[in-house]
Amino acid sequence: MPGSLAALLCLGMYLSQSIMAQKDDLPKPSLWAVPGSVIPWGKSVIVRCQGAEGAHRFLLEKDGSTELRDMLEVPGPWKEAEFFIPDIAAETAGRYRCRYQRQSHWSELSDPLELVVTGLYPKPSISVKPASTVVVGQGVTLHCESQLGSDRYVLYKTTGANAPHALLSSDYHANFPFPAVTDSNGGTYLCYSFDSDFPFLWSTPSDTLVLKIAGSSQDSHLEHVTPNYDYATQHHNFLSLRLVLVGVTLAILGALVNEVWRNRGSAQLPNKKPLA
């Protein structure tokens, strides 16, 4: 028993050193989410991992978990793989990384991608002081508050200059001060709340608040546009349909080739006369 354990430890050390040596040969992969990494509960998301040319296997890992590991074999030497995650739930949230294999070599892990699930708690409130219409140079404060006493808030700017943009507050009553506003501060804002113990589980977004800068050269009536979270599902369905069509086409071609060979074989058979 001790001998077997020692052998396993030696094998593990050898494999670890081998992988570390191979990591230097391949560039680090990139990892991102479509349509974004902040996803409403119940929606779908596509996680894309991009490696070097010639990659044929991709592995998606979730930090702190071995259950949500996924591996994809790509049909041919591609450098990108798509992991489709339907019906986002609380257990889906977390920090993800990916790696890829080319020939017998594995790359190092990508930088982390944080998937956030929203809609787990009631929406917080958002307000502004002294007013939602101010002049350039005037001070203004946006305030977010949750009835649940959350200790973290994220203020999102969804329209206007530099959007999308996010600010984080570590306070039970979040204040986001702008001491001297400029034209670029105008736009549409909303906020999320969450608990610091569960940083990837956010509330439903608050109502939107439009901050107008009087006399601004920018459009003060910007439309708030929400991401198209149905894109992931539509894209996955399109890929599935395309694969089905390819399969049907190959089946038809195979049947035609088989029929041609059968006809050719029948034509080459010698004509036998019946015995007298």
Image: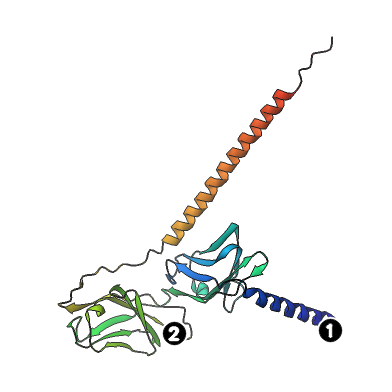
Q: Position of residue 177 (x, y in %)?
A: 28, 88
Residue at 52% of width from left, 77% of height from top?
A: 112
Q: Nearer the viewer, residue 38 or 257?
A: 257
Is residue 239 shown above or below 257? below
| Neighbour tally class for label 2: few under 14, some 14-19, many 20 plus, Cα within 10 Å | some
Q: Amino acid at mark 1?
A: Pro
N-terminal label among 2 and 1: 1
In the displayed structure image, the side of residue 122 where residue 129 appears, left or right? left
Say if residue 216 shows up in the picture. yes
Residue at 85% of width from left, 82% of height from top?
A: 3
Residue 2 image label: 1
Q: Between label 2 and label 1, give the one nearer the viewer.
A: 1
Find out whether the residues at labels 2 and 1 contact each other: C-beta distance under 8 Å: no
Going by the picture, which residue comes out furthest to the front? 25
Q: Position of residue 159 (x, y in %)?
A: 29, 72
Q: State the SS at label 2.
A: loop
- Which of the 4 quarters of the picture holds residue 99? bottom right
Name the image quarter holding the N terminus. Answer: bottom right
Q: Position of residue 135 (x, y in %)?
A: 16, 83
Residue 206 image label: none
Q: Nearer the viewer, residue 270 or 115?
A: 270
| Neighbour tally class for label 1: few under 14, some 14-19, many 20 plus, Cα within 10 Å | few
Q: How many marks?
A: 2
- Which of the 4 quarters of the picture holds residue 202? bottom left
Q: Gap in Å between the C-alphas at discs 2 and 1?
A: 46 Å
Name the image quarter holding the C terminus. Answer: top right
Q: Position of residue 20 (x, y in %)?
A: 66, 77
Q: Amino acid at mark 2?
A: Asp
Residue at 57% of width from left, 46% of height from top?
A: 247
In the displayed structure image, the side of residue 190 where residue 232 appears, left or right? right
Residue 195 image label: 2
Q: State the SS at label 1.
A: helix
